[in-house]
Image (tube, coloured by chain):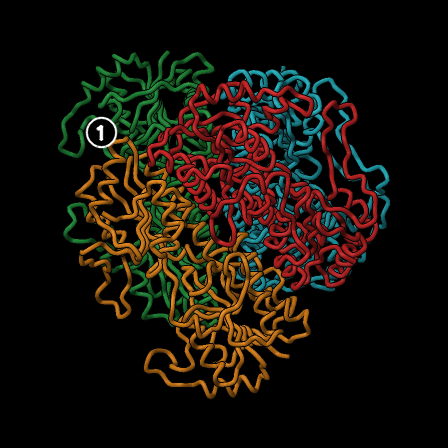
Chain colours: A orange, B red, C green, D cyan
């Protein structure tokens, strides 16, 4: 048997741990493993390399992916929505390589593409990758714990400045649609205010919390997801350098909030946009273990020929769900989420009036 | 309502996060909260302090417990097996304080004592604390992730030395009866060999792995739990300084293994006993969140008057189990454990012949 | 003898280590120590607290300053350039407190104010505080190593993403006038390009390096100080939200460079503005030791009545320089700096044509 | 020109940063660079590899040495004191390779061997490597800051346990002859007691400090170098497993102190032997920069043909000293050391009566 492995979409800590585990587990079973470079780009541009024990030695703790990845390489619409369909050529290459199956490690987009290849005759096993922890039917994805750890450490750092100066410090985290990183990171970092996309916030509620802290002689730590939105207010959260063909995001909801909040409070308000450091670097121990479990589970799905499925964590068990159930859906923080209610219970301001 | 909070047994990262969450959640509900110092010792020696928002501010990220703890303070057998029963005096003090309930954060031993106080008329809610992750009916305890992270980081460090010198490096972790720390820490740190109490090991199997690595030009990283035992061999694992009234543990199974392994392999073998650093320091982000959830869940059990129960994590949900079901039992790595099988799948040597 | 201690200006890791050391060393000498809150603000608003061994216990590893600080509290120009001179009132309070001397921990601005108080009759000893490592006559200041460590760790993280995606990643660090943080942080983080205020850069030179890396199949890591400037080009580096009374900095030279660089290279270019996380959090071991040395040296200057002096590190020795020599001057990276030349020697692109 | 590079003796964080910098700086000058594997072993066993930009890419942050090292490979006394002199064969291989010079990165022993090869006609430049910071004429060596950081972090962790239990915690660090690691690590970690080889300690003085802390309601943190010795007392600090041909060190001065201290104090006393984790892992930012400077300086010595010299840090400047001045000497903590006196000034117990 001969299996290809690729990583697609944005990078995230733990990808290498998956690659290592799936490779070692397949090799132990006598399967030949080939790494495809830069996601589906490698299948189109015909860039592959053999994966053996030596190739995956020492990569467990490395961030990113040794195979490389690509955000936009879709063989069904090559580079953009109106792009050419190069899937037939791609399948020809798959047959040339003699691949019996593909392990696709990626998010929504990667799963959708993989699903289409499956219908063209390339059996696929999926491994969910989402720094935002928002893939449907999967309770926890590798990389998420690492991102939360970065946010918590940043809040630890910002807290010392906030305390020393009596300031309001705003930290803007990843999370365009799902607030998991801001919620867990904010709880772990002791944020006074946590604002997520799923719950529109009131600027006045946030200001009230800041003023209450000021009166108690303290500072305020705000953790806001990039996708959080003010209740009933039109936000112009993006500022771009106009002349740029590819506009650059300069400030987001964090800066917008700072601008609105400053006139309402006595303390100085400052914003930090955490940015790309949230998704790089060595995975936490938790993510290394989870990614290893996912890699082994993917190898087992291959061995059991349970194609068309994606590995998923449900409760504490590694299980599998049909890829078709996953594509184009995502998992958000529900109103009755236990963590959300825990935040409420300890008095974290969640932005509601 | 007036609730006491105590922490008993060995310390562990996340205790302060529990204290903070249970206090904030109870205060928000109008409950008066009193901290009892040094576990049950404080109830006997009458050392308590009020807990309010200011008292728990800024403790989320601090290791250990602001209340202090004690390993041996059992009011039913005061300092040792034949000790006096001072529980009546203790209950008198409880009534004097006007405590309506007690939140006891601790392990097996603390739960057993709490259970006996419950029968004397002090309603109790338990929060499981075990660095070893071995409390029955609770899948993951706070502090465990922090210990695993310390082990993984230590293995990362030892790996660079092992690689540079072509050595066999043995790291001995906590885990007298349950191998969870060695198993997860070993997996996260990329150990070649993981040895745990639940699976007797063969020295020859370990040596064979070391020799195979030597032939491949590599080093070997061994992660062994302090309670691991060789198959069919009497081990004299403890060396003590004889004249000491309280014998000091100098070396354990790691050193024993080094002694047996050295003649069987070509490389130098070295041992590191990780010791107390595994249980101290700031909790990981994961543990801060879990401990916060546990604290909130304990406050809710108090508010719902579901006494006699201990908070527990099952799957991904915080739930509650009767304390009576927990006392004197513990959770070990089962033969069919998913993580154990994952380790096997990627070729980790688990010591069996 | 009775000595006041204050921290002024921006916070920085190691302030608490100085406060602890100066307090313990003075106490050991029989001196009474009083902490002044929030810099010179505390002398005006009459907020002080006694400092004894208990007050400084456990603060060594804490970021920020337990005394609080203030950026703009100048008794000679109360809140801004045209502000009232309240120095006479302040001196009255100093006499009321019975302060024999003041230990002022701060930067340029704090030293200037302290110098003026000295002339009003309050003997002063200075301790240099600058996250940018740019105080004249002082080769290394506490907090700087911590900031460099944050930058290096951020570059480590960004490198994994850059490598996985084949990107150009720009990290913008602190350093408005002096490039020490970008230079040391960039070297420590393995940056391919380091741009500092002391050396105007050519966009084309940077682009050439990026293209060379692209051709070698690699990524590019750029570390740029916020004060770096393009050679011969007018930069509009600041974008603000217009309606804000206190304009918010949204993007700086890093985003400006991204905008100019993107059309010149094939890879995606992304920018991260490291922001406030560079100055918060627990100090590195190096900074804890240096800050302790500075605190002890300040106490010794007090004991020797060498007032009007500031502690300084020259070579490896703690020495003292007249405060008058320090005020309003700063230390920049000279063209023949050894580190700068080391960066050149290993082929780091420093922006010159 | 053709230059060989080797790393000898124990490993230490920053070796790869030196290898990278010396390689890049020599390559930029048109020099051919060859890496010799496992120290002088590679010259005897004829194991070398070319070093180019690709070979040293990405190794800056890696602990250990990509070239490997060996503790005992001395071509003048092959494997042990009575070993054969294989230096003539080694020189034949050197001539065969066409090496014009050797950059030897190592400690005392490596410098002595290098010095002898110099007299046989192989020009040598030395780079000092000592985790203990004890090479003569060199004020700070790479790897030392990383070891100090590990000790400080361990003390941070142990402090939380000590505080929670009211314990005396002893941490034994590296430092057989020189106490720099214990001194700086102890200061950085807030140790109450620091014991180093240069200053014999009195058990009673240590016990007195523990009792004073007990009376103040606190715990005690002791940092002791492995080479520290009790004043006027014969210590039997080593316990070995007798049957081992290569006796294993089970416990050292830390456990010895625990045994003596326990009867003299009320609290529990516990010991942690920090071991090999002190020398592994990624170097701190400080060490990455210092190692890079050392590598560049070594390349410059080669380019200037200043052979027979070793790079050295004096004050803040990289300079060079004759290797002959360095061999068989080491740098200890002098009685008037500024750091030592700083420790005294803040009341750290240094063991003297």
Q: Quadrant of residue D326?
A: top right
Which sits in the foreground, D257 or A290? Answer: A290
Q: Name the side, left or right, on which B265 lies relative to A317.
A: right
Q: Position of residue A183 (x, y in %)?
A: 37, 51
What x and y, as percent, mark residue A52? 64, 70
Q: Nearer the viewer, residue C143 or D247?
A: D247
Q: How many marks?
A: 1
Q: Nearer the viewer, residue D198 or B183?
A: B183
Chain name for mark 1 = C
Q: From this view, report whether residue D166 is shown above or below residue A175.
A: above
The answer to which of D62 and D23 lies nearer the viewer is D62
Q: Is residue B182 visible?
A: yes
Q: Residue at x 28, y 38 (%)?
A: A167
Q: Position of residue A141 (x, y in %)?
A: 47, 60
Instruction: Classify residue B163 as left or right of residue D18.
Output: right
Q: Quadrant of residue D140?
A: top right
Residue designated by label 1: C74
Q: Is residue B17 left or right of residue D167?
A: left
Circle 1: is it few (<14), some (14-19), or many (20+) Cα within 10 Å?
many
Residue D172's place in the image compared with C255, above or below, is above
Q: Is residue C144 visible?
A: no
Quadrant showing the N terminus of chain A:
bottom right
Q: Position of residue D252 (x, y in %)?
A: 72, 31
Q: Secondary structure at mark 1?
A: loop
Residue at the location (26% across, 70% down)?
A: A245
At x 43%, y 50%, the residue is A150
D39 lies left or right of B127: right
């Amino acid at each position: 048997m001969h299996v290809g492995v690729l990583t697609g979409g944005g990078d995230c800590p733990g990808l290498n741990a998956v690659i290592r585990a799936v490779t070692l587990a397949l090799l132990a079973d006598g399967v030949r493993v080939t790494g495809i470079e830069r996601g589906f780009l490698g299948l189109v541009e015909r860039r592959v390399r053999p994966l053996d024990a030596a190739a995956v030695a020492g990569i467990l703790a490395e961030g990113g992916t040794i195979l490389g990845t690509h955000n936009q390489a879709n063989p069904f619409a090559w580079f953009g929505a109106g792009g050419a369909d190069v899937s037939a050529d791609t399948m020809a290459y798959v047959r040339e390589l003699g691949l019996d199956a593909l392990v696709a490690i990626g998010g929504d987009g990667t799963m959708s593409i993989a699903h289409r290849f499956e219908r063209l005759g390339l059996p696929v096993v999926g491994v969910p990758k989402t720094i935002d922890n928002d893939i449907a039917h999967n309770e926890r994805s590798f990389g998420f714990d690492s991102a939360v750890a970065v946010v918590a450490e940043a809040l630890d750092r910002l807290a010392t400045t906030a305390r020393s100066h009596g300031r309001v410090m705003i930290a803007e985290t990843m999370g365009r649609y799902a607030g998991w990183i801001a919620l867990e990171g904010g709880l772990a970092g002791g944020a006074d205010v946590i604002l997520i996309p799923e719950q529109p916030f009131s600027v006045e509620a946030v200001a009230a919390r800041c003023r209450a802290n000021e009166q108690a002689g303290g500072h305020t730590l705000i953790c806001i997801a990039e996708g959080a939105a003010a209740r009933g207010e039109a936000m112009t959260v993006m500022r771009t350098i106009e002349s740029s063909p590819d506009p650059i995001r300069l400030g987001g909801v964090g800066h917008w909030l700072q601008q609105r909040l400053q006139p309402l409070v006595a303390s100085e308000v400052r914003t930090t946009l955490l940015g790309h450091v949230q998704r790089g670097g060595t995975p936490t121990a938790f993510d290394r273990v989870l990614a290893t479990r996912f890699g082994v589970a993917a190898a087992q799905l291959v061995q059991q020929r349970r194609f068309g499925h994606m590995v998923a964590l449900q409760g504490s068990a590694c299980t599998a769900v049909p890829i078709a159930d996953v594509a184009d859906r995502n998992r958000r923080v529900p109103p009755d989420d236990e963590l959300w209610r825990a935040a409420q219970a300890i008095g974290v301001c969640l932005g509601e009036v």
